[in-house]
Every structure is written in structure tokens, then in C-alpha cells.
Amino acid sequence: MDIEVVRKAPLFSGLGDEATGALLELMTTSTLDRGSVLFDEGDPGSELYVIVTGKLKLGRTASDGRENLLSILGPGEMFGELSLFDPGPRTATVTAVSDCTLLGLANNHLMTWLDGRPEAARNLLQALAARLRRTNDTVGDLVFSDVPGRVAKALLDLADRFGRPAADGVLVAHELTQEELAQLVGASRETVNKALADFAARGWIRLEARAVVLLDVERMTSRAR
């Protein structure tokens, strides 16, 4: 297990070797194949997960069947932290976008480990605050930003977390279908495809299979505002 990858998770940030090692002993390792569901919205839950390898998507389904993609998560990111303090029904369905390796931590194990480790409790509170901040940003984008702006912002966010240098820009292998990308920005697939085609025509991006190359990050950043 690469401890540096694990330490990217907010819960582990800044912890010493003793505290991190003690926590790892309490965590269980599991794997998930691409397309497999870890848990469904509404399932009971009392466990936090940290992604070691791979990507996962968190989504919700409306009563009329419409789907909304809440976020895409990758190595070093965690989810399910709400269930540690308020065990109850899961608020989203979690599906593997690629093959994944996960570390799971049960509610009772975390409470035992937190005793005498105030710095870890602060880390977790900061992680919860960051989750609330992201939720507020998402709501604000849906109200105040147009679809092209939301698409540009989503691609920049994916590039920040998953991008890697390419010969002519930044390659973002997001591994999402066009429908999933549309769900991520809360718009129809047709509208999102139109925005992507416009960005490509302007020379700002190049579209590839389940990936995009950002050719002009400055212009994309300006459009995302």
C-alpha cells in the first residue's frame, strides 16, 4: 500500500507515522471492478472509504428516473464520511468508473482511533466543511452559470485532479460517457455536446474517447468564470 497516496485523503493529512499506521490497521481493503456498484442510494451505511486506485462516481436518481452525477472521485479522495457521525441511509449511489482499490473504515473503529488524536478530529471537520463548500459552489453554479461555463469549470476541475501533461496541452482521461458528463454539470447531453463542439472549434480543447485534451487552459478558465 502506497502510504503517500493514502495521505492525500483529508483524514490522513498532516498525521504522523504512528497515527497513520494505527488507522491503517483498522481499515479493510476491497476491490471493485469497472461498472460495479459499491452501494446504492438508500442503503444503510456506517463506513467511510478512501480511494487508493481508480475512479468512482457518486450519483442520485430522481423519482421520475432522471439521474444526476454529483462528483467523480479518484486516488487520495474519500467519501461516506457523513455516515461516520450519522449512520443512516446512503445519500448517493457509488459506481466504479474504472477498476478500483478502496480502504474502508467503520464508524466504531474511527471513534476509538479518534480518542486522544485531536489533530485527526480537526482534519475530519475540515473535510466535512470542504464537502459543504463544494455543495454550495455547485448550487451557485446551477443558479448563476450557463451550461458552457459549467462544462468549462467541470473540465478544469477534472484536469486539476486527474490531468497529466500532453505534447500540446493537458490530457484529462475522465473516463466518462457523454451522458455522464452531462449529468455532472446538470444539463442535457445535447446542450453539453454543443458546448464541447464549440470549445473544440475555437481550438480550446480536443475531444478524444472518454477524454479531452485542454489546449488553451487560460481561455477555458476565463469561460468558467
Image (cartoon, rainbow, N blue to C red):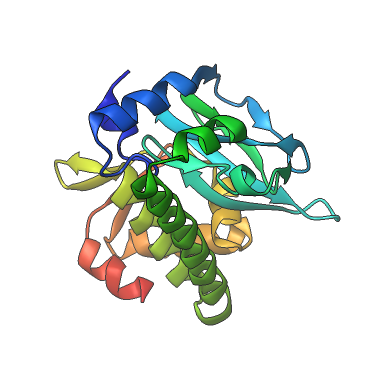
- Give coordinates of residue 185: x percent, y percent: 54, 61
> Closest to the observer: 193 or 4?
4
Residue 178 in sight in this render:
yes
Q: Residue at x 32, y 47 (%)?
A: 161
For the point 52% across and 57% down, the residue is 193
Q: Is residue 48 above or below residue 151?
A: above
Q: Position of residue 200 (x, y in %)?
A: 35, 58
Left or right of 85: which side holds 211? left
| Quadrant housing residue 15 | top left
Percent across and percent down for residue 209 are 42, 37
- Looking at this view, is 14 or 208 the one in front? 14
Say which residue appears at 55% left-offset and 41% top-offset: 57
Quadrant in which residue 116 is drawn: top left
Specify whether residue 99 is in view. Answer: no
Q: Quadrant of the N terminus?
A: top left
Q: Look at 36% across and 38% down and name the residue there.
A: 173
* Extreme residue in the front direction: 116
Q: Residue furthest left?
A: 167
Q: Nearer the viewer, residue 218 or 45?
A: 45
* Residue at the farthest bottom position: 144
128 or 150: nearer the eye? 128
